[in-house]
């Protein structure tokens, strides 16, 4: 006699999509005595969308959990490896990607059959009772009721959803023939840029044609309206899309299935369960269709939920384990999907890229495909992109030189400015010599100082360096002389700044942004607004005399920097310091000529820049670091950042160093790998100006990918250089690159090979005994 299944016995499932059906099947298979009822308001053969894509990883999970479903899916799948990218008459093909798809209707049929065979009570054309009612009569309620989840809305105070709309319209359609590859096609119309995403999901002959393909047409909202597609009946717009993409479709029509133009909504929930009710699939989270993850996430949710119910001693423990297991995976997917979504939203900024670079940029848009793994998938395609970029044979993109005015950087790696808080009276000492000297010996093309303050009251902390005295200048000269002598070819740049309202605070490790216990100096800013009200002091708003004094302090520091032998000068207009405080509307509330609209808020930073550019040697470049967003409502936006960059470039900036945030304490950054690079990307490809990308760039693969995609010209890394001062040289060794872009200092040359870490040539076993 079979023992009763542990855990919940009576289970209600709301929603008959793939996630709900698969959860019901798995839980019934694991506990045949369970009473499982699934409600679906539509008919069994109703479905929306056409084909779905599943990864090998997801299929592996299905195979282990339910071989019956896996075998049925295997018989149906259409598989292919290539991606075709069509733009301006050029088709770029990249292979080795590995896709599997089938019709959504057939997927549902397989899951219906499995559920019915296991004894799940499937109730079609039936609205589910409210989740609260079901929760009183069932042990577990699974809400798989989609992006418009009524369950989530009814218990919003518990799930705490956050739903974000986006800037494109899209429509799901089908074509009655099977494409040979995943196809992206770009159409530059009189209304604006439109894009087609299409892939095969059936190769079986049908009355309609030889197989079938999913076709999604997407465009910015303003393009959609300009094209006249904003009418209740989409039929004419569908015909127009077929005409626009006639070559891709072989002049065939597009087929609708109650299709409508939609705006994608990103769903995030603070919690996925409430009592004995749990969300799965789109009810819990969504990820943009451009990375093909909706059905994948729902099926994986079902797998994890069933496993946790089976493994955990109680339902609360199972629901906690399910969320703990799935949330990191989902958040990672959502970050990748958000990057992909934004890429397509900003597609118009990329259309002038060279054909191969455009294709590489599209393929790596989500950051999940990178230069290194694309090189493994399709070495010929990647080699073509590298050649178009200008890489010499055997040279990774990061080791190609870049010229800014009279300065040629031998590679694209920058040691990012990092405050060390280790100076005495603004004088850099032995620590700075060793710190910067070690990183110069480590192979980076450009080593930047920390923010060097232009006055005593412009320091952030008592440990900050300065360039407002001759003693400080002499100490900096010692550093630049060492870099130029011990590491020829390495450039060293100085970043000049003034702390503004964020000054007179403790060393970072003693209490970041906290005022000194004693010895505070007065601080100044654009407006009399403390950084943290009730914590930091109220700054004095600079008047005309104060503005002139600060500008002359920057000028005096720049003259000393020239005499010190710095190769590049960067003006710090980011992170809430003085000049940044003029740029942000959250920190600049002036009513004179330096406040109000952005053009006025730019005036004083531009005055300082103009003063420095006039006296800084013409053959030496100047860059500007900006915060491209304040990560706060009402603050600097990405659109503002483009205009700020445009203004500095018009005044002679040679590159824009694009950082974000640290302007107001209430910011909410969207942290993640390379999370700040989209802002650099947007500035570069909107204005066609060189940019330095920063922000959680940690691998040489990321650096190569960003450069080759045309999202950045230089990559600045901070923490990786704290972890490994020789990060660039090690990146060269790991890529097998011995060339001039990363020369090892003569005393270190014996270490240029990766040292062995253990024996790897042991004989392999010949037999495996069971």
Image (cartoon, grey):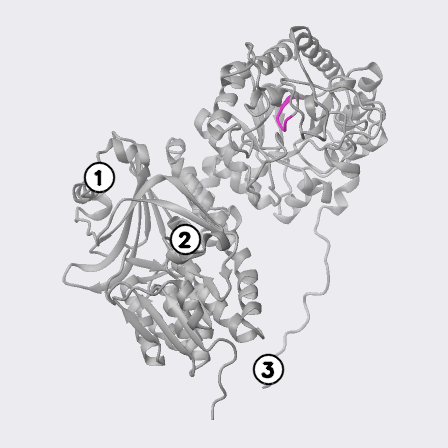
Of the pair 610 and 536, the residue shown nearer to us? 536
Q: Is residue 57 visible?
A: no
Nearest to viewer (mark 2 / mark 1): 2
Magenta range is: 569-576
User: Residue at (49%, 20%) from the top-left corner?
Assistant: 646
Q: Is residue 516 magenta?
A: no
Task: Kindly identify which numbered label has been placed on residue 244.
Answer: 1
Q: For numbered disc 1, what is the local secondary structure? A: helix
On the image, the x and y values in percent for residue 672 come to 57, 45
Q: Are marks 2 and 1 in contact (CB under 8 Å)?
A: no
Q: For numbered disc 3, what is the local secondary structure? A: loop
Task: Kindly identify which numbered label has been placed on residue 768.
Answer: 3
Cα separation between marks 3 and 2: 55 Å
Q: In which image quadrant can residue 519 be found? A: top right
Q: For numbered disc 2, what is the local secondary structure? A: helix
Question: Left or right of 22: which side holds 563?
Answer: right
Tally the marks.
3
Question: Left or right of 218: which side holds 372?
Answer: right
Q: What secondary structure characterizes most of the magenta part?
A: strand
Q: Residues within 10 Å of mark 1 (few under 14, many from 20)?
A: some
User: Residue at (34%, 65%) from the top-left corner?
Assistant: 129
Cα separation between marks 3 and 1: 60 Å
Name the N-terminal-most of marks 3 and 2. Answer: 2
On the image, the x and y values in percent for residue 637 come to 49, 29
Question: Left or right of 208: which side holds 355?
Answer: right
Task: Kindly identify which numbered label has been placed on residue 153.
Answer: 2
Q: Is residue 572 magenta?
A: yes
């Amino acid at each position: 006699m079979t023992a009763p299944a542990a855990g919940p016995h009576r289970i209600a499932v709301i929603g008959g999509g793939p996630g709900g059906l698969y959860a019901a099947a798995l839980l019934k298979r694991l506990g045949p005595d369970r009473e499982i009822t699934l409600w679906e308001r539509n008919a069994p053969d109703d479905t929306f969308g056409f084909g779905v894509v599943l990864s090998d990883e997801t299929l592996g999970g299905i195979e282990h959990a339910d071989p019956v479903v896996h075998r049925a899916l295997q018989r149906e799948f259409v598989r292919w490896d290539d991606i075709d990218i069509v733009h301006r008459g050029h088709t770029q093909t990249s292979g080795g990607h590995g896709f599997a798809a089938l019709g959504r209707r057939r997927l549902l049929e397989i899951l219906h059959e499995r559920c019915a065979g296991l004894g799940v009570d499937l109730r079609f054309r039936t609205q589910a009772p409210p989740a609260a009612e079901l929760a009183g009569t069932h042990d577990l309620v699974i809400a798989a009721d989609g992006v418009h989840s009524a369950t989530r809305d009814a218990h919003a105070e518990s799930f705490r959803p956050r739903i974000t709309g986006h800037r494109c319209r899209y429509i799901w359609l089908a074509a009655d023939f099977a494409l040979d590859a995943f196809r992206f096609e770009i159409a530059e119309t009189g209304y604006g840029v439109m894009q087609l995403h299409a892939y095969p999901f059936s190769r079986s002959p049908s009355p309609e044609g030889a197989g079938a393909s999913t076709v999604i047409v997407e465009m910015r909202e303003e393009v959609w309206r300009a094209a006249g597609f904003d009418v209740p009946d989409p039929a004419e717009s569908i015909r127009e899309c077929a005409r626009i993409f006639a070559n891709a479709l072989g002049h065939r029509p597009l087929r609708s299935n109650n299709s409508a133009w939609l705006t994608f909504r990103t769903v995030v929930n603070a919690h996925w369960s409430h009592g004995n009710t749990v969300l799965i699939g789109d009810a819990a989270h969504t990820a943009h269709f451009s990375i093909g993850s909706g059905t994948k996430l729902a099926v994986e949710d079902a797998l994890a939920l069933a496993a946790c119910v089976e493994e955990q001693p109680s339902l609360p423990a199972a629901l906690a384990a399910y969320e703990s297991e799935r949330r990191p995976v989902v958040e990672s997917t959502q970050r990748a999907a958000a990057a992909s979504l934004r890429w397509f939203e900003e597609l118009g900024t990329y259309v002038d890229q060279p054909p191969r670079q455009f294709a590489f940029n599209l393929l790596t848009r989500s950051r999940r495909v990178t230069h290194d793994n694309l090189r493994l998938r399709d070495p010929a395609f990647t080699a073509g992109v590298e050649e178009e970029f200008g890489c010499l044979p055997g040279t990774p993109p990061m080791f190609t030189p870049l010229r800014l005015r009279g300065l040629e950087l031998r590679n694209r790696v920058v040691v990012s400015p990092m405050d060390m808080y280790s100076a005495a009276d603004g004088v850099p000492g032995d620590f700075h010599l060793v710190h910067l000297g070690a990183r110069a010996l480590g192979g980076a093309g450009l080593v930047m100082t920390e923010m060097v303050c232009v006055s005593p009251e412009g320091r952030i902390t008592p440990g900050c360096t300065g360039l407002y005295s001759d003693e400080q200048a002499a100490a900096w000269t010692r550093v630049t002389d060492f870099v130029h002598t011990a590491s020829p070819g390495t450039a060293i740049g100085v970043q000049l700044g003034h702390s503004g309202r964020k000054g007179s605070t403790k060393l970072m490790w003693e209490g970041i942004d906290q005022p000194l216990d004693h010895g505070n100096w007065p601080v100044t800013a654009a407006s009399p607004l403390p950084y943290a009200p009730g914590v930091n002091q109220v700054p004095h708003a600079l008047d005309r005399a104060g503005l002139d004094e600060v500008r002359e302090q920057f000028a005096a520091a720049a003259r000393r920097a020239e005499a010190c032998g710095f190769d590049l000068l960067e003006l710090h207009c980011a992170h809430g310091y003085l000049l940044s405080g003029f740029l942000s509307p959250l920190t600049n509330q002036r009513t004179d000529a330096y406040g109000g609209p952005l053009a006025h808020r730019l005036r004083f930073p531009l005055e300082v820049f103009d003063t420095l550019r006039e006296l800084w040697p013409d053959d030496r470049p100047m860059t500007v670091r900006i915060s491209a967003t304040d990560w706060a409502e009402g603050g600097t936006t990405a659109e503002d950042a483009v205009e700020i960059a445009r203004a500095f470039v018009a005044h002679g900036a040679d590159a824009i160093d694009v950082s974000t945030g640290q302007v107001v304490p209430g910011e909410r950054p969207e942290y993640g790998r390379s999370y700040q690079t989209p802002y650099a990307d947007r500035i570069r490809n909107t204005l066609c100006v060189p940019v330095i990308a920063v922000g959680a760039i940690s691998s040489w693969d990321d650096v190569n990918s960003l450069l080759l995609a045309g999202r950045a010209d230089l990559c600045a890394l901070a923490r990786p250089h704290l972890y490994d001062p020789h990060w660039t040289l090690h990146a060269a060794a790991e890529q097998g690159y011995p060339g001039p872009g990363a020369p090892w200092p003569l005393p270190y040359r014996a270490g240029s090979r990766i040292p062995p870490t253990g024996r790897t040539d042991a004989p392999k076993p010949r037999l495996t005994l069971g």
